[in-house]
Amino acid sequence: MSEPLDQPARVIAIGASAGAVDALAAILPALPAQFPYPILVVVHIREDRDSMLVELFRRQCALDIREAEDKLPLEDGVVYFAPPDYHLLVEADGWLALSVDEPVNFSRPSIDVLFESAAQAFGDRLVGVVLTGANQDGAHGLRSIIDAGGRAIVQDPSSAYAATMPQAAIAACPEAQPMSLEQIATYLRDLGSSK
Amino acid sequence: MVPDKTELLELQLLLEAIFRRYHYDFRGYSLASLQRRLTLAKDRFDCRTFSQLQDRVLHDPSVLPILLSYLTVQVSDLFRDPSYFRAIREEVVPHLRTYPSLKVWVAGCSDGEEIYSLAILFREEGLESRTLFYGTDINPDALRRAETGRYAMDRIAQFTKNHQLSGGKSSLSDYYSAAYGAAVFDRSLRRRIVFSDHSLVSDSVFAEVQLISCRNVLIYFNKDLQDRAIGLFRDSLSRQGFLGLGSKENLRFSQHADSFKEFVPGERIYQLRGEL
Protein backbone atom coordinates (compact mmCIF):
# COMPACT_ATOMS: atom_id res chain seq x y z
CA MET A 1 0.00 0.00 0.00
CA SER A 2 1.33 3.40 -0.88
CA GLU A 3 0.82 6.64 1.02
CA PRO A 4 -1.89 6.88 3.69
CA LEU A 5 -4.95 8.66 2.45
CA ASP A 6 -8.02 10.35 3.71
CA GLN A 7 -10.57 7.64 3.33
CA PRO A 8 -14.22 8.44 2.84
CA ALA A 9 -16.31 8.12 6.00
CA ARG A 10 -18.79 5.97 4.12
CA VAL A 11 -19.08 4.48 0.66
CA ILE A 12 -22.24 3.43 -1.18
CA ALA A 13 -22.01 0.57 -3.71
CA ILE A 14 -24.98 -0.13 -5.97
CA GLY A 15 -25.56 -3.03 -8.37
CA ALA A 16 -28.36 -3.23 -10.91
CA SER A 17 -29.21 -5.20 -14.03
CA ALA A 18 -32.44 -5.52 -16.03
CA GLY A 19 -34.49 -2.40 -15.32
CA ALA A 20 -31.45 -0.57 -13.94
CA VAL A 21 -31.97 2.75 -15.64
CA ASP A 22 -35.43 3.39 -14.22
CA ALA A 23 -34.41 2.12 -10.80
CA LEU A 24 -31.34 4.35 -10.63
CA ALA A 25 -33.42 7.25 -11.92
CA ALA A 26 -35.56 6.92 -8.79
CA ILE A 27 -32.49 7.12 -6.54
CA LEU A 28 -29.58 9.14 -7.91
CA PRO A 29 -31.48 12.33 -8.90
CA ALA A 30 -33.00 12.38 -5.38
CA LEU A 31 -29.58 12.95 -3.82
CA PRO A 32 -28.17 16.45 -3.34
CA ALA A 33 -24.99 17.80 -4.96
CA GLN A 34 -23.34 17.95 -1.55
CA PHE A 35 -23.99 14.28 -0.78
CA PRO A 36 -21.03 13.54 1.48
CA TYR A 37 -20.03 10.07 0.26
CA PRO A 38 -18.79 8.47 -2.98
CA ILE A 39 -21.18 6.14 -4.80
CA LEU A 40 -19.97 3.22 -6.92
CA VAL A 41 -22.36 1.76 -9.47
CA VAL A 42 -22.19 -1.43 -11.52
CA VAL A 43 -24.84 -1.85 -14.18
CA HIS A 44 -24.87 -4.77 -16.57
CA ILE A 45 -24.65 -3.35 -20.04
CA ARG A 46 -24.00 -4.90 -23.42
CA GLU A 47 -20.27 -5.01 -23.79
CA ASP A 48 -19.94 -3.75 -27.32
CA ARG A 49 -21.53 -0.43 -26.53
CA ASP A 50 -20.12 2.68 -24.95
CA SER A 51 -21.74 3.56 -21.69
CA MET A 52 -24.60 5.98 -22.19
CA LEU A 53 -25.32 5.91 -18.48
CA VAL A 54 -22.88 8.65 -17.55
CA GLU A 55 -24.39 11.06 -20.07
CA LEU A 56 -27.91 10.05 -19.15
CA PHE A 57 -27.54 10.58 -15.41
CA ARG A 58 -25.43 13.69 -15.75
CA ARG A 59 -28.49 15.37 -17.20
CA GLN A 60 -30.73 14.19 -14.37
CA CYS A 61 -28.54 14.51 -11.29
CA ALA A 62 -27.14 17.20 -9.07
CA LEU A 63 -24.34 14.79 -8.17
CA ASP A 64 -21.09 14.66 -10.13
CA ILE A 65 -21.43 11.62 -12.44
CA ARG A 66 -18.30 10.03 -13.91
CA GLU A 67 -17.04 6.86 -15.49
CA ALA A 68 -14.69 5.12 -13.05
CA GLU A 69 -10.99 5.40 -13.91
CA ASP A 70 -8.17 3.10 -12.96
CA LYS A 71 -5.92 4.07 -9.99
CA LEU A 72 -7.80 7.13 -8.83
CA PRO A 73 -8.88 7.89 -5.26
CA LEU A 74 -12.57 8.20 -4.42
CA GLU A 75 -14.09 11.62 -3.93
CA ASP A 76 -17.14 12.40 -1.86
CA GLY A 77 -20.22 13.42 -3.78
CA VAL A 78 -19.12 11.65 -6.95
CA VAL A 79 -20.97 8.76 -8.61
CA TYR A 80 -18.62 6.36 -10.40
CA PHE A 81 -20.06 4.05 -13.05
CA ALA A 82 -18.09 0.94 -14.00
CA PRO A 83 -17.07 1.23 -17.66
CA PRO A 84 -18.61 -1.32 -20.04
CA ASP A 85 -16.59 -4.52 -20.44
CA TYR A 86 -14.40 -3.84 -17.38
CA HIS A 87 -14.70 -5.02 -13.81
CA LEU A 88 -14.60 -2.24 -11.24
CA LEU A 89 -12.72 -3.02 -8.02
CA VAL A 90 -11.51 -1.17 -4.95
CA GLU A 91 -7.93 -1.56 -3.73
CA ALA A 92 -7.24 -1.96 -0.02
CA ASP A 93 -6.10 1.67 0.09
CA GLY A 94 -9.50 2.75 -1.22
CA TRP A 95 -8.43 3.56 -4.77
CA LEU A 96 -10.37 2.36 -7.79
CA ALA A 97 -9.03 -0.32 -10.11
CA LEU A 98 -10.27 -1.83 -13.37
CA SER A 99 -9.70 -5.29 -14.75
CA VAL A 100 -10.51 -7.34 -17.83
CA ASP A 101 -10.55 -10.60 -15.90
CA GLU A 102 -13.07 -13.12 -17.11
CA PRO A 103 -16.75 -12.32 -16.67
CA VAL A 104 -18.25 -13.34 -13.32
CA ASN A 105 -21.86 -14.52 -13.36
CA PHE A 106 -21.60 -13.98 -17.14
CA SER A 107 -21.10 -10.31 -16.39
CA ARG A 108 -18.31 -7.80 -16.85
CA PRO A 109 -18.61 -5.55 -14.96
CA SER A 110 -19.81 -7.83 -12.20
CA ILE A 111 -21.54 -6.64 -9.05
CA ASP A 112 -19.93 -9.40 -6.96
CA VAL A 113 -16.45 -8.27 -8.02
CA LEU A 114 -17.12 -4.69 -6.92
CA PHE A 115 -18.90 -5.65 -3.69
CA GLU A 116 -16.29 -8.19 -2.56
CA SER A 117 -13.33 -5.90 -3.11
CA ALA A 118 -15.14 -2.91 -1.60
CA ALA A 119 -16.10 -4.98 1.46
CA GLN A 120 -12.41 -5.76 2.00
CA ALA A 121 -11.42 -2.13 1.62
CA PHE A 122 -14.17 -0.39 3.57
CA GLY A 123 -15.57 -2.91 6.06
CA ASP A 124 -18.36 -1.36 8.15
CA ARG A 125 -18.16 1.93 6.26
CA LEU A 126 -19.77 0.31 3.22
CA VAL A 127 -23.44 0.27 2.28
CA GLY A 128 -24.30 -2.24 -0.45
CA VAL A 129 -27.49 -1.91 -2.48
CA VAL A 130 -28.85 -4.60 -4.83
CA LEU A 131 -31.55 -3.43 -7.23
CA THR A 132 -33.63 -5.01 -9.97
CA GLY A 133 -32.12 -7.72 -12.20
CA ALA A 134 -32.76 -11.03 -13.93
CA ASN A 135 -29.69 -12.90 -12.71
CA GLN A 136 -27.94 -13.66 -9.41
CA ASP A 137 -25.00 -11.30 -9.56
CA GLY A 138 -24.51 -9.34 -6.35
CA ALA A 139 -25.78 -11.96 -3.90
CA HIS A 140 -22.32 -13.25 -2.96
CA GLY A 141 -20.92 -9.77 -2.85
CA LEU A 142 -23.68 -8.53 -0.56
CA ARG A 143 -22.91 -11.46 1.75
CA SER A 144 -19.27 -10.31 1.85
CA ILE A 145 -20.36 -6.78 2.70
CA ILE A 146 -22.41 -7.99 5.67
CA ASP A 147 -19.63 -10.33 6.81
CA ALA A 148 -17.20 -7.41 6.77
CA GLY A 149 -19.57 -5.39 8.97
CA GLY A 150 -21.26 -3.30 6.28
CA ARG A 151 -24.95 -2.63 5.69
CA ALA A 152 -27.05 -4.36 3.06
CA ILE A 153 -30.11 -3.01 1.29
CA VAL A 154 -32.12 -4.86 -1.35
CA GLN A 155 -34.87 -3.55 -3.52
CA ASP A 156 -38.12 -5.16 -2.42
CA PRO A 157 -38.50 -7.94 -5.04
CA SER A 158 -42.25 -7.35 -5.40
CA SER A 159 -41.54 -3.79 -6.51
CA ALA A 160 -38.64 -4.66 -8.80
CA TYR A 161 -38.83 -4.70 -12.59
CA ALA A 162 -36.99 -8.05 -12.43
CA ALA A 163 -37.19 -9.86 -9.10
CA THR A 164 -34.54 -12.58 -9.54
CA MET A 165 -31.53 -10.56 -8.47
CA PRO A 166 -33.06 -9.01 -5.34
CA GLN A 167 -34.52 -12.41 -4.42
CA ALA A 168 -31.12 -14.07 -4.75
CA ALA A 169 -29.58 -11.32 -2.62
CA ILE A 170 -32.19 -11.78 0.11
CA ALA A 171 -31.73 -15.55 0.03
CA ALA A 172 -27.99 -15.11 0.55
CA CYS A 173 -28.47 -12.29 3.06
CA PRO A 174 -31.58 -12.70 5.23
CA GLU A 175 -30.44 -9.75 7.34
CA ALA A 176 -30.55 -7.37 4.36
CA GLN A 177 -33.25 -4.70 4.53
CA PRO A 178 -35.80 -4.85 1.69
CA MET A 179 -36.95 -1.38 0.61
CA SER A 180 -38.84 0.25 -2.21
CA LEU A 181 -36.87 2.56 -4.53
CA GLU A 182 -38.38 5.59 -2.77
CA GLN A 183 -37.33 4.22 0.61
CA ILE A 184 -33.81 3.59 -0.66
CA ALA A 185 -33.59 7.17 -1.92
CA THR A 186 -34.83 8.51 1.43
CA TYR A 187 -32.51 6.21 3.36
CA LEU A 188 -29.45 7.38 1.44
CA ARG A 189 -30.48 11.03 1.66
CA ASP A 190 -30.90 10.72 5.43
CA LEU A 191 -27.57 8.91 5.70
CA GLY A 192 -25.99 11.84 3.90
CA SER A 193 -27.62 14.54 6.00
CA SER A 194 -26.85 12.79 9.31
CA LYS A 195 -23.10 13.05 8.74
CA MET B 1 -14.83 -2.07 12.78
CA VAL B 2 -11.71 -2.04 10.64
CA PRO B 3 -11.69 -4.54 7.76
CA ASP B 4 -9.68 -7.64 8.57
CA LYS B 5 -6.34 -7.14 6.87
CA THR B 6 -4.92 -10.55 7.78
CA GLU B 7 -5.77 -11.98 4.39
CA LEU B 8 -4.12 -9.03 2.70
CA LEU B 9 -0.98 -9.67 4.75
CA GLU B 10 -1.02 -13.34 3.75
CA LEU B 11 -1.45 -12.33 0.12
CA GLN B 12 1.58 -10.05 0.30
CA LEU B 13 3.62 -12.78 1.98
CA LEU B 14 2.61 -15.24 -0.74
CA LEU B 15 3.77 -12.83 -3.44
CA GLU B 16 7.03 -12.30 -1.56
CA ALA B 17 7.53 -16.06 -1.35
CA ILE B 18 6.87 -16.55 -5.08
CA PHE B 19 9.37 -13.81 -5.83
CA ARG B 20 12.12 -15.05 -3.51
CA ARG B 21 11.71 -18.69 -4.53
CA TYR B 22 10.96 -18.40 -8.24
CA HIS B 23 11.83 -14.81 -9.22
CA TYR B 24 8.37 -14.01 -10.56
CA ASP B 25 7.63 -10.60 -9.15
CA PHE B 26 3.96 -9.79 -8.65
CA ARG B 27 4.59 -7.54 -5.67
CA GLY B 28 3.86 -4.41 -7.66
CA TYR B 29 0.61 -5.70 -9.10
CA SER B 30 -2.77 -4.28 -8.25
CA LEU B 31 -3.81 -6.38 -5.27
CA ALA B 32 -7.59 -6.31 -5.66
CA SER B 33 -7.45 -8.30 -8.90
CA LEU B 34 -4.70 -10.60 -7.64
CA GLN B 35 -6.73 -11.36 -4.54
CA ARG B 36 -9.66 -12.50 -6.66
CA ARG B 37 -7.51 -14.65 -8.91
CA LEU B 38 -5.53 -16.20 -6.10
CA THR B 39 -8.73 -16.92 -4.18
CA LEU B 40 -9.77 -19.07 -7.15
CA ALA B 41 -6.36 -20.77 -7.06
CA LYS B 42 -6.65 -21.28 -3.30
CA ASP B 43 -9.98 -23.03 -3.78
CA ARG B 44 -8.61 -25.17 -6.58
CA PHE B 45 -5.79 -26.42 -4.35
CA ASP B 46 -8.19 -26.91 -1.45
CA CYS B 47 -6.26 -24.44 0.66
CA ARG B 48 -8.07 -22.60 3.41
CA THR B 49 -5.74 -19.60 3.43
CA PHE B 50 -3.12 -17.91 1.29
CA SER B 51 -0.59 -19.08 3.88
CA GLN B 52 -1.48 -22.69 3.06
CA LEU B 53 -1.15 -21.90 -0.63
CA GLN B 54 2.25 -20.38 0.10
CA ASP B 55 3.31 -23.60 1.78
CA ARG B 56 2.20 -25.58 -1.27
CA VAL B 57 3.96 -23.44 -3.85
CA LEU B 58 7.19 -23.20 -1.83
CA HIS B 59 7.53 -26.95 -1.46
CA ASP B 60 6.02 -28.15 -4.72
CA PRO B 61 7.43 -26.46 -7.84
CA SER B 62 4.77 -28.12 -10.00
CA VAL B 63 2.22 -25.79 -8.40
CA LEU B 64 3.96 -22.72 -9.80
CA PRO B 65 2.90 -23.01 -13.48
CA ILE B 66 -0.70 -23.43 -12.39
CA LEU B 67 -0.48 -20.41 -10.12
CA LEU B 68 1.08 -18.45 -12.97
CA SER B 69 -1.89 -19.27 -15.15
CA TYR B 70 -4.17 -17.76 -12.49
CA LEU B 71 -1.90 -14.77 -12.06
CA THR B 72 -1.35 -13.85 -15.68
CA VAL B 73 -3.87 -15.17 -18.18
CA GLN B 74 -5.76 -12.50 -20.01
CA VAL B 75 -8.43 -13.59 -22.40
CA SER B 76 -8.54 -11.38 -25.46
CA ASP B 77 -9.98 -11.60 -28.94
CA LEU B 78 -8.46 -11.10 -32.34
CA PHE B 79 -9.05 -7.45 -33.25
CA ARG B 80 -10.53 -6.74 -29.81
CA ASP B 81 -11.84 -3.15 -29.86
CA PRO B 82 -12.02 -2.96 -33.67
CA SER B 83 -11.88 0.84 -33.62
CA TYR B 84 -8.36 0.62 -32.14
CA PHE B 85 -7.18 -1.46 -35.08
CA ARG B 86 -8.98 0.82 -37.48
CA ALA B 87 -7.04 3.74 -36.00
CA ILE B 88 -3.76 1.82 -36.33
CA ARG B 89 -4.64 1.10 -39.95
CA GLU B 90 -5.80 4.57 -40.90
CA GLU B 91 -3.69 6.87 -38.71
CA VAL B 92 -0.53 5.00 -37.71
CA VAL B 93 0.21 2.86 -40.77
CA PRO B 94 0.70 5.88 -43.10
CA HIS B 95 3.54 7.00 -40.82
CA LEU B 96 5.00 3.51 -40.58
CA ARG B 97 5.10 3.23 -44.38
CA THR B 98 7.90 5.80 -44.43
CA TYR B 99 10.27 3.39 -42.62
CA PRO B 100 12.33 0.89 -44.65
CA SER B 101 12.15 -1.62 -41.81
CA LEU B 102 9.86 -1.86 -38.80
CA LYS B 103 9.75 -3.44 -35.39
CA VAL B 104 6.52 -3.92 -33.46
CA TRP B 105 6.31 -5.01 -29.83
CA VAL B 106 3.22 -6.49 -28.21
CA ALA B 107 4.03 -6.35 -24.50
CA GLY B 108 2.09 -8.87 -22.44
CA CYS B 109 1.02 -10.83 -25.52
CA SER B 110 -0.66 -13.64 -23.57
CA ASP B 111 -2.08 -16.20 -26.02
CA GLY B 112 -1.14 -14.11 -29.05
CA GLU B 113 -4.49 -12.67 -30.15
CA GLU B 114 -3.15 -9.14 -30.46
CA ILE B 115 0.05 -10.01 -32.31
CA TYR B 116 -1.75 -12.15 -34.90
CA SER B 117 -4.20 -9.30 -35.38
CA LEU B 118 -1.34 -6.91 -36.10
CA ALA B 119 0.43 -9.42 -38.35
CA ILE B 120 -2.74 -9.80 -40.42
CA LEU B 121 -3.29 -6.05 -40.51
CA PHE B 122 0.32 -5.44 -41.61
CA ARG B 123 -0.01 -8.08 -44.33
CA GLU B 124 -3.18 -6.40 -45.59
CA GLU B 125 -1.35 -3.08 -45.64
CA GLY B 126 1.71 -4.49 -47.39
CA LEU B 127 4.04 -3.90 -44.45
CA GLU B 128 4.47 -7.43 -43.14
CA SER B 129 7.60 -8.31 -45.13
CA ARG B 130 9.56 -5.38 -43.70
CA THR B 131 8.35 -5.88 -40.12
CA LEU B 132 9.60 -7.93 -37.21
CA PHE B 133 7.04 -8.55 -34.47
CA TYR B 134 8.01 -9.23 -30.87
CA GLY B 135 5.45 -10.86 -28.60
CA THR B 136 6.56 -10.96 -24.98
CA ASP B 137 5.02 -12.34 -21.83
CA ILE B 138 6.20 -13.70 -18.49
CA ASN B 139 4.10 -16.86 -18.70
CA PRO B 140 5.90 -19.62 -20.65
CA ASP B 141 2.67 -21.58 -21.13
CA ALA B 142 0.98 -18.56 -22.70
CA LEU B 143 3.96 -18.07 -25.02
CA ARG B 144 3.76 -21.71 -26.08
CA ARG B 145 0.04 -21.35 -26.80
CA ALA B 146 0.67 -18.12 -28.69
CA GLU B 147 3.23 -19.92 -30.83
CA THR B 148 0.73 -22.56 -31.85
CA GLY B 149 -1.69 -19.89 -33.09
CA ARG B 150 -4.57 -22.18 -32.19
CA TYR B 151 -7.93 -20.87 -30.96
CA ALA B 152 -11.21 -22.60 -30.19
CA MET B 153 -13.49 -22.60 -33.23
CA ASP B 154 -16.36 -21.05 -31.27
CA ARG B 155 -14.36 -17.84 -30.91
CA ILE B 156 -13.93 -17.37 -34.66
CA ALA B 157 -17.30 -15.71 -35.26
CA GLN B 158 -16.37 -12.88 -32.87
CA PHE B 159 -12.86 -12.63 -34.36
CA THR B 160 -14.34 -12.39 -37.86
CA LYS B 161 -16.81 -9.71 -36.85
CA ASN B 162 -14.06 -7.71 -35.14
CA HIS B 163 -11.78 -8.04 -38.15
CA GLN B 164 -14.45 -6.69 -40.48
CA LEU B 165 -15.23 -3.79 -38.15
CA SER B 166 -11.53 -2.96 -37.98
CA GLY B 167 -11.54 -2.24 -41.71
CA GLY B 168 -10.13 -5.62 -42.70
CA LYS B 169 -9.33 -5.81 -46.41
CA SER B 170 -9.43 -9.57 -46.69
CA SER B 171 -11.38 -12.48 -45.27
CA LEU B 172 -10.17 -13.73 -41.90
CA SER B 173 -10.75 -17.29 -43.14
CA ASP B 174 -7.78 -16.77 -45.49
CA TYR B 175 -5.51 -16.94 -42.45
CA TYR B 176 -6.57 -20.07 -40.61
CA SER B 177 -7.55 -23.65 -41.25
CA ALA B 178 -9.97 -25.60 -39.14
CA ALA B 179 -8.76 -28.74 -37.44
CA TYR B 180 -10.42 -30.76 -34.68
CA GLY B 181 -12.65 -27.98 -33.39
CA ALA B 182 -9.87 -25.42 -33.46
CA ALA B 183 -8.79 -22.73 -35.88
CA VAL B 184 -5.05 -22.85 -36.50
CA PHE B 185 -3.58 -19.65 -37.88
CA ASP B 186 -1.31 -19.91 -40.87
CA ARG B 187 2.35 -20.65 -40.14
CA SER B 188 3.38 -17.97 -42.59
CA LEU B 189 2.03 -15.37 -40.16
CA ARG B 190 4.56 -16.54 -37.60
CA ARG B 191 7.58 -16.18 -39.89
CA ARG B 192 7.99 -12.57 -38.83
CA ILE B 193 7.02 -13.07 -35.16
CA VAL B 194 9.43 -13.71 -32.31
CA PHE B 195 7.84 -14.84 -29.06
CA SER B 196 9.98 -14.28 -26.02
CA ASP B 197 10.02 -14.24 -22.26
CA HIS B 198 10.22 -10.65 -21.02
CA SER B 199 9.06 -8.99 -17.83
CA LEU B 200 7.93 -5.38 -17.64
CA VAL B 201 8.72 -5.59 -13.93
CA SER B 202 12.37 -6.62 -14.07
CA ASP B 203 13.71 -6.68 -17.65
CA SER B 204 15.03 -3.82 -19.73
CA VAL B 205 15.04 -2.51 -23.29
CA PHE B 206 15.77 -5.22 -25.88
CA ALA B 207 15.13 -3.48 -29.20
CA GLU B 208 14.30 -0.17 -30.79
CA VAL B 209 10.73 -0.37 -32.04
CA GLN B 210 8.34 1.89 -33.94
CA LEU B 211 5.08 0.62 -32.43
CA ILE B 212 4.26 -0.83 -29.02
CA SER B 213 0.85 -2.22 -28.26
CA CYS B 214 0.24 -2.92 -24.57
CA ARG B 215 -3.45 -3.00 -23.86
CA ASN B 216 -5.10 -3.85 -20.57
CA VAL B 217 -1.80 -4.84 -18.99
CA LEU B 218 -1.00 -1.66 -17.09
CA ILE B 219 -4.32 -1.73 -15.21
CA TYR B 220 -2.95 -4.76 -13.37
CA PHE B 221 0.06 -2.77 -12.09
CA ASN B 222 0.31 -0.29 -9.25
CA LYS B 223 1.39 3.23 -10.08
CA ASP B 224 5.12 2.69 -9.54
CA LEU B 225 5.13 -0.34 -11.79
CA GLN B 226 3.04 1.50 -14.37
CA ASP B 227 5.67 4.22 -14.42
CA ARG B 228 8.46 1.68 -14.81
CA ALA B 229 6.72 0.03 -17.76
CA ILE B 230 5.93 3.33 -19.45
CA GLY B 231 9.55 4.42 -18.97
CA LEU B 232 10.62 1.20 -20.63
CA PHE B 233 8.28 1.91 -23.55
CA ARG B 234 9.65 5.43 -23.88
CA ASP B 235 13.22 4.11 -23.98
CA SER B 236 12.31 1.37 -26.49
CA LEU B 237 10.50 3.57 -29.00
CA SER B 238 12.29 5.27 -31.83
CA ARG B 239 11.66 8.99 -32.15
CA GLN B 240 8.02 9.63 -32.99
CA GLY B 241 7.23 5.98 -32.36
CA PHE B 242 3.73 4.93 -31.30
CA LEU B 243 2.31 3.48 -28.11
CA GLY B 244 -1.19 1.97 -27.95
CA LEU B 245 -2.88 1.39 -24.58
CA GLY B 246 -6.17 -0.13 -23.50
CA SER B 247 -9.35 1.90 -23.89
CA LYS B 248 -9.46 2.76 -20.16
CA GLU B 249 -5.75 3.36 -19.73
CA ASN B 250 -3.98 6.68 -20.16
CA LEU B 251 -0.71 8.46 -19.50
CA ARG B 252 -2.26 11.46 -17.76
CA PHE B 253 -0.90 10.65 -14.31
CA SER B 254 2.35 9.08 -15.42
CA GLN B 255 5.67 10.75 -14.65
CA HIS B 256 6.50 10.16 -18.32
CA ALA B 257 3.37 11.92 -19.63
CA ASP B 258 5.43 14.80 -21.06
CA SER B 259 7.45 12.44 -23.25
CA PHE B 260 4.34 11.56 -25.25
CA LYS B 261 1.61 13.37 -27.10
CA GLU B 262 -1.87 12.09 -27.78
CA PHE B 263 -1.97 10.87 -31.36
CA VAL B 264 -5.45 9.30 -31.57
CA PRO B 265 -6.89 10.36 -28.20
CA GLY B 266 -10.12 8.35 -28.38
CA GLU B 267 -8.17 5.16 -29.02
CA ARG B 268 -5.39 5.84 -26.49
CA ILE B 269 -2.71 5.87 -29.16
CA TYR B 270 0.25 8.04 -28.15
CA GLN B 271 3.28 9.24 -30.06
CA LEU B 272 6.70 9.74 -28.56
CA ARG B 273 7.69 13.35 -28.97
CA GLY B 274 10.33 13.82 -31.63
CA GLU B 275 12.61 16.33 -29.90
CA LEU B 276 15.81 15.07 -28.34
Image (spheres, coloured by chain):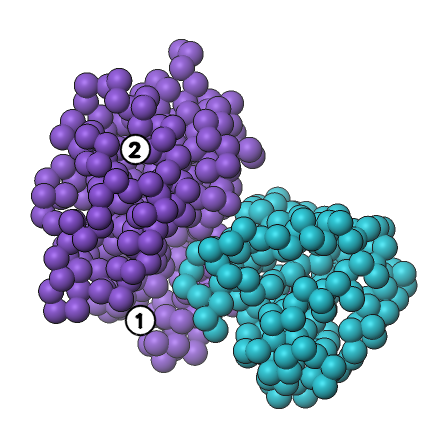
Frontmost of labels 2 and 1 is 2
Mark closest to the chain's N terminus, 2 or 1:
1
Task: Look at the image and give the colour of chain B.
Answer: purple
User: What residue type is disc 1 on?
Assistant: Arg
For disc 1, the neighbor class at 10 Å (few under 14, some 14 to 19, many from 20) is some
User: What residue type is disc 2 on?
Assistant: Ser
For disc 2, the neighbor class at 10 Å (few under 14, some 14 to 19, many from 20) is some
Callout 2 secondary element: loop
Q: Is residue A132 visible?
A: yes
Residue B262 placed where, x, y %?
A: 49, 27
Residue A171 placed where, x, y %?
A: 62, 88
Task: Look at the image and give the colour of chain A.
Answer: cyan
Residue that label 1 marks: B56
Residue A173 placed where, x, y %?
A: 65, 84
Residue that label 2 marks: B204
Residue shown at 25% from the left, 40% from the top: B169
Q: Chain of mark 2?
A: B
Residue A112 placed where, x, y %?
A: 55, 70
Q: CA distance from mark 2 to mark 1?
A: 31 Å
Q: Is the same chain shared between marks 2 and 1? A: yes
